[in-house]
Image: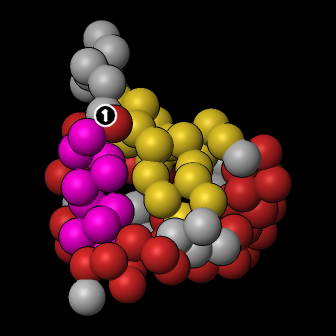
Amino acid sequence: MREFRARLHRDEATVRLSPAGRERPGETADDVVVAAVDASAGPPDENGWTIAVLPIESLTHAHGDLLRLGAEVEVLAPAELRDRLAATASGLARIYGAT
């Protein structure tokens, strides 16, 4: 089953994860993604955020999956995924009246 899941992931995304976000992939992602995050995570910066590379099935799937992490993740690449999440965040801010 793990091999099947690994074949589903045809691309990758580079992300910054907060300390809380670093702990959460196990709650929202399969074991292939968790293992990739664990293997690729760099050392935490001065605020505890780490950069990691995670496998993604598609931009659409990654968009939905990463939204679950909320403000605990920042997509660095690919740009199209970052743009999609930024547009969603802007739309949510309009709906909820964020200042």
Question: Relative to 69, is 77 on the left or the right?
Answer: right
Asked whether 80 or 4 is in front, the reply is 4
x and y percent of residue 84 in the render? 77, 62
* Quadrant of the rendered image containing residue 62: bottom right
Q: Is residue 86 magenta?
A: no
For disc 1, the marked residue is: 41
* Residue at image point 57% right, 74% down: 57
Q: Is residue 32 magenta?
A: yes
Q: Is residue 53 above or below residue 62?
A: above
Q: Quadrant of residue 28?
A: bottom left
What's the magenta region? 29-39
For the stretch drawn in magenta, the main secondary structure is helix
Q: Nearer the viewer, residue 30 or 45?
A: 30
Q: As displayed, is residue 12 above or below residue 50?
A: below
Q: Is residue 97 visible?
A: no
From the viewer's side, name the closer residue of 90 and 6: 6
Residue kind at label 1, given as amino acid type: Ala
- Total label count? 1
The quadrant of the image that shows the N terminus is bottom left
Is residue 50 visible to us here?
yes
